[in-house]
Image (cartoon, grey):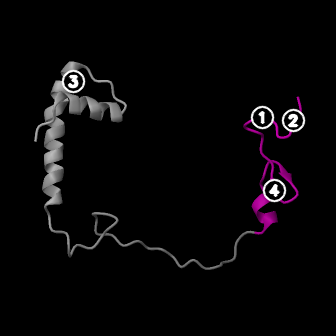
Amino acid sequence: MALSADDVRRLAMLARLELSDDEVNAIGPQITKILGFVEQLSELDTEDVEPMTTALDVDNRWRADKLQPSLTNDQALQNAPARDDDCFLVPPVLGTAGAKS
């Protein structure tokens, strides 16, 4: 199934691409080949194929999500250049908070 030039222009518009007439004529056959390949894939019987997250044969090594000891607030703030009670102080990046004009 070959795509018409209008089909290619419609796809280009959906993809927010501006294509010249030469580009439309060059890309049309390429898109047709891609769609043919996708059509071939849809013919495959995937009934007994397990869903997977990667094509690589790897195992994720997730640790159990359990409570473990961590730093105290004082330890975490020990080397902070500026602090306010139990918090890091950082310079404002979007202006000063609560500034009145």
Q: Nearer the viewer, residue 97 or 22?
A: 22
Q: Earlier in the sequence, mark 2 or mark 4?
A: 4
SS at circle 1: loop
Q: Where does label 4 land, which residue?
A: 87
Q: Cα distance, mark 2 to mark 4?
A: 21 Å
Q: Which of marks 2 and 3 is nearer the N terminus?
A: 3
Q: Cα distance, mark 2 to mark 1?
A: 8 Å
Q: Residue at x 21, y 26 (%)?
A: 24
Q: Which residue is drawn at 15% across and 52% down?
A: 39
Circles 2 and 1, Cβ within 8 Å, touching? The answer is yes
Q: Cα distance, mark 1 to mark 3?
A: 47 Å
Q: Where does label 1 land, which residue?
A: 95
Q: Nearer the viewer, residue 28 or 55?
A: 28
- Dividing the picture into quarters, in which one does residue 30 lie? top left
Sort mark 4 into few (<14), some (14-19) or many (20+) by Cα contacts within 10 Å: few
| Residue 65: image location, x then y, percent | 57, 77
Say if the magenta span includes residue 82.
yes
Label at residue 99: 2
Circles 1 and 4, Cβ within 8 Å, touching? The answer is no
Q: Residue at x 34, y 35 (%)?
A: 14
The three-letter amino acid code for the residue at tag 4 is: Cys
Sort mark 3 into few (<14), some (14-19) or many (20+) by Cα contacts within 10 Å: few
Circles 2 and 4, Cβ within 8 Å, touching? The answer is no
Magenta highlight range: 72-101
- Dividing the picture into quarters, in which one does residue 42 lie? bottom left
| Residue 28: image location, x then y, percent | 17, 32
| Residue 5: image location, x then y, percent | 18, 28
Q: Nearer the viewer, residue 76 or 15?
A: 15
Is residue 28 shown left or right of residue 99? left
- The outermost residue toward the left is 1
